[in-house]
Image: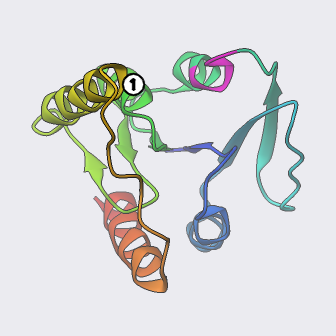
Amino acid sequence: MRILVDADACPVKNIIIRIARQNNIPVFMFIDTSHVLNDGYSEIITVDKAKDSVDIAIANKVRRGDIVVTQDYGVAVMVLGKGARAISPNGLVFTDNNIDMLLFERHLGHMTRKAGGRTKGPSKRTKVDNAKFERAFETLIMN
């Protein structure tokens, strides 16, 4: 098992590193060239700043049994298709049972915005969000 992180805007990198260290699990942080990262534990993989370059790099590197931390439903679909597991920074574990509905809701939001409508953005992150992620992440690692 390895942990791959879509790290450009990931708010839980410190939690991931702490838990990975405790469990001796290798971590790969994927960033584009507009970011700098050095946490002293992860292998940092820097890719071009092109659209979806981090997503494609993760999809190419992931293997069966890995865990990917991403907010991107498209990345989650690719990861699940390769026999890996995926979790969002909010603690939502992506599964074959929920990914279709999540993609459909994303599509509806896109269509609403395209038609000139507005959709609600994400709420401000709280300590409760971090605790929820930590619990779900630890459970994912242990199972």
Q: Residues within 10 Å of mark 1 (few under 14, many from 20)?
A: some
Q: Is residue 54 magenta?
A: yes
Label 1: element kind: helix
The reply, left or right, for residue 102 in relation to residue 136 is left
Q: What residue lies at 20% left-to-right and 40% top-to-bottom?
A: 95
The reply, left or right, for residue 101 in relation to residue 128 is left
User: Which corner quadrant of the image does residue 106 belong to?
Assistant: top left
Residue projecting furthest to the bottom: 127
Q: Position of residue 110 (x, y in %)?
A: 32, 25
Q: Looking at the image, is 34 positioned above or below residue 88?
A: above
Q: Quadrant of the C terminus?
A: bottom left
Q: Nearer the viewer, residue 25 or 85?
A: 85
Q: Is residue 95 magenta?
A: no
Q: Position of residue 83 (x, y in %)?
A: 32, 27
Q: How is the image coloured?
A: rainbow
Residue projecting furthest to the front: 116
Amino acid, disc 1? Gly
Q: What residue lies at 59% left-to-right and 56% top-to-bottom?
A: 25
Q: Nearer the viewer, residue 111 or 143?
A: 111
- What is the count of numbered marks? 1
The reply, left or right, for residue 105 in relation to residue 45 is left
Q: What residue lies at 32% left-to-right and 43% top-to-bottom?
A: 119
Please, what is the dominant secondary structure of the magenta stretch? helix
Give the residues in magenta: 51-55
The reply, left or right, for residue 16 in relation to residue 86 is right
Q: Give the residue at mark 1.
A: 74
Q: Position of residue 118 (x, y in %)?
A: 33, 40
